[in-house]
Amino acid sequence: MAVTLDIARDNPNAQTIAGIADDTQLDDGKSTLIGLNRDELGEALGTIGVPQKQWRMRASQLWHWLYVRGVSDFSEMTNIAKDLRAKLADAFTIARPKIVSEQISVDGTRKWLFQFPPRGAGRPVEVETVYIPEEGRGTLCVSSQVGCTLTCTFCHTGTQKLVRNLTPEEILSQILIARDRLGDFPDAQTPQGAIVPSEGRLVTNIVMMGMGEPLYNFENVKKALLIASDGDGLSLSKRRITLSTSGVVPEIFRTGDEIGCMLAISLHAVRDDDRDILVPINKKWNIEALLDACRNYPGLSNAKRITFEYVMLKDINDSNQDALELVRLLKGIPAKINLIPFNPWPGSQYACSDWERIEEFADIVNRAGYASPIRTPRGRDIFAACGQLKSASERMRKKDREALQAKKAAVY
């Protein structure tokens, strides 16, 4: 049975997550320092009177406390003078966003529901983030948008309209809070009984496979991932960061050239007529255009293969002929194929392929020389599996947003 720990989520019997208090919410009216690069940190310091000749040194100090030590309170920055800490606290925030709920699956998978400020949506918004523990690694599935525009018919997130893009701070905060909750910062304690990797760091891999299409929020995702992979901070190897796209062809080359992470493609069909239905972005950039972009991905090699994700849908895309066509399409592309058993969700029109069918499909692909692991479903009991993420966030109508903003202005 899955365990759900809720924080004040319209549930009088909800349990409060140990160690989480109301002050985890972002401070009203203050700019956050999370998500700023070093130059921007220096400029922010200048606004509170720090001399320009100190910007570089002070920015490095902040960077260390934010991304190596993982602090969320300026008072903990002990090598910074108290008066400067006070100025920082008056002008800025580094507080974590609100955790609405944390769910723990029977298999150790954790799913968090985070709440972020409105920023154009008219009301606070929520996204889901998932942690998947394995023996040798811990993978964090990070969201890039609130909702999604792609309407992939097999994906639960696709049934939620796009509310807004996440900022670099909001993308990074998902990583920071996960590391907080898992005890993955120096001197922190791992929660008793948590299922985590047996040794080393607890968050070892990042996959941009949560809510939203990362390449429709390219600049913010790029900025967040460059900070996450900075060797003097969170220090996640770019070989351990994978960005998944449904096929935003113009941004694929930029992903390799400007971010340098691993690439995953949500393929899911081998013919345009089928993919037009499953992944409607295919009507704009078809399979041929998508695979041409993949062949030109910077750094593509056997050591830096592209992962093709293929959800197994019964009697839709799982025949032997589909497997053979998949092999033909990918000829010449260093690749591996992740076969994903379909994860059901309420109202879905699809069913998962039979296990024997999936294994036969995998055998055909394997015999052609491509690794085709069958992904073990994780977190299904808490709707944390691939394609199941969704939140209740909606964008307010323009007139309602304007009315709310006028009401706030009258108060202040």
Image: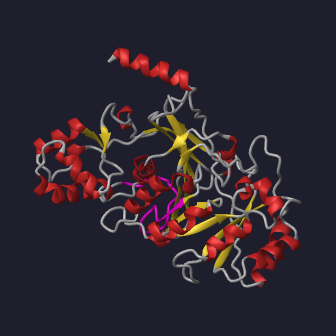
**What residue do we see at 68% from left, 71% from top?**
291
Q: Position of residue 179 (x, y in %)?
A: 42, 54
Q: Nearer the viewer, residue 8 or 198?
A: 8
Q: Position of residue 148 (x, y in %)?
A: 62, 46
Q: Position of residue 119 (x, y in %)?
A: 45, 35
Observer able to see residue 118: yes
Quadrant housing residue 238: bottom left
Q: Quadrant of the C terminus?
A: top left
Q: Which residues are magenta?
A: 189-207
**What residue do we see at 22% from left, 56% from top?**
59
Quadrant housing residue 31: top left
Q: Is residue 277 left or right of residue 129?
A: right
Q: Nearer the viewer, residue 180 or 289?
A: 289
Q: Nearer the viewer, residue 212 or 248?
A: 248
Q: Is residue 305 left or right of residue 48?
A: right
Q: Nearer the viewer, residue 248 or 335?
A: 248
Q: Is residue 369 left or right of residue 39?
A: right
Q: What secondary structure prevails in the magenta region?
A: loop
Q: Position of residue 118 (x, y in %)?
A: 46, 33
Taking the magenta stretch, the answer to whether it contains residue 22 is no
Q: Quadrant of the N terminus?
A: top right
**What residue do we see at 77% from left, 55% from top?**
278
**What residue do we see at 44% from left, 35% from top?**
117
